[in-house]
Image: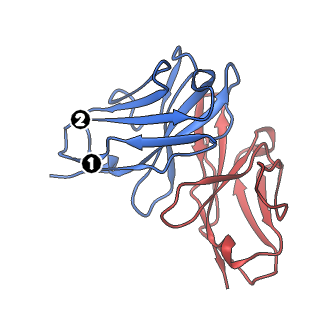
Amino acid sequence: QVQLVESGGGVVQPGGSLRLSCAASGFTFSSYGMHWVRQAPGKGLEWVAFIRYDGSNKYYADSVKGRFTISRDNSKNTLYLQMNSLRAEDTAVYYCAKGTELELRGGWFDPWGQGTLVTVSS
Amino acid sequence: SYVLTQPPSVSVAPGQTARITCGGNNIGSKSVHWYQQKPGQAPVLVVYDDSDRPSGIPERFSGSNSGNTATLTISRVEAGDEADYYCQVWDSSSDLWVFGGGTKLTVL
């Protein structure tokens, strides 16, 4: 079955950096776009970033553009999120989620990983 | 940017029908997807492309979309349906994915 497992979360000081990973299994990873979505404590869901199946295109929410970088290694079936210049408002559970296949645009998120908590605090 | 508006809360008695709305400008021209999130768990897709159900999702969950409002309908509500529900669309004009603010469904 499809499985997504995030890792790399933790406590980081404001201005610091962190890299999240998402290990995928149970499907042809290299054929699907992938997303990062976050959820601040007690708040709703916020889409963060998307990368196409081949890594050729990347899209970001305005709130993270210029600070976060999404990437993937299809040989390792792994998705990444490099987070720089972190702020208190970036504190959230970060989920990776499987997107659409190949050239299809838009679409939904299914399934989701269990999430990893990032806390930005001094 | 495109905005989706959901009521913060909806309450319903067991066995009754719950309707959760998602408002957006001409949302009927977009594909709407719905997620269920129980406390401490990751979201789960319950309806995609306005009205389709993933495998394993009960027929009690259905969706519709027209004009400026999309609706998630849960028939014969059970205690286990108590959760937060989020609508989501893709804004093709900006290539961004958007979530509604979420609705907490309470089963009385």
Which residue is more in the foreground, B7 or A23? A23
For mark 2, name the chain: A
Residue at 58% across, 21% down: A30
Q: Nearer the viewer, mark 2 or mark 1?
A: 1
For residue B63, what is the image quadrant? bottom right
For mark 1, name the chain: A
Query: In the image, which lettered chain appears red?
Result: B
- Secondary structure beneath dot 1 equals strand
Q: Relative to B75, is A28 on the left or the right? A: left
Residue B105, above or below A15: below
Where is mark 1, residue-wise? Answer: A10
Query: In the image, which lettered chain appears blue?
Result: A
Q: Amino acid at mark 1?
A: Gly
Residue A53 in the image: x percent, y percent? Answer: 58, 21
Q: Is residue B70 visible?
A: yes
State how far apart marks 2 and 1 are (Cα).
Answer: 11 Å
The mark that comes first in sequence, 2 or 1, is: 1
Where is mark 2, residue-wise? Answer: A17
Residue A90, above or below A16: below
Residue at 48% across, 18% down: A75
Q: Relative to B10, is A83 on the left or the right? A: left
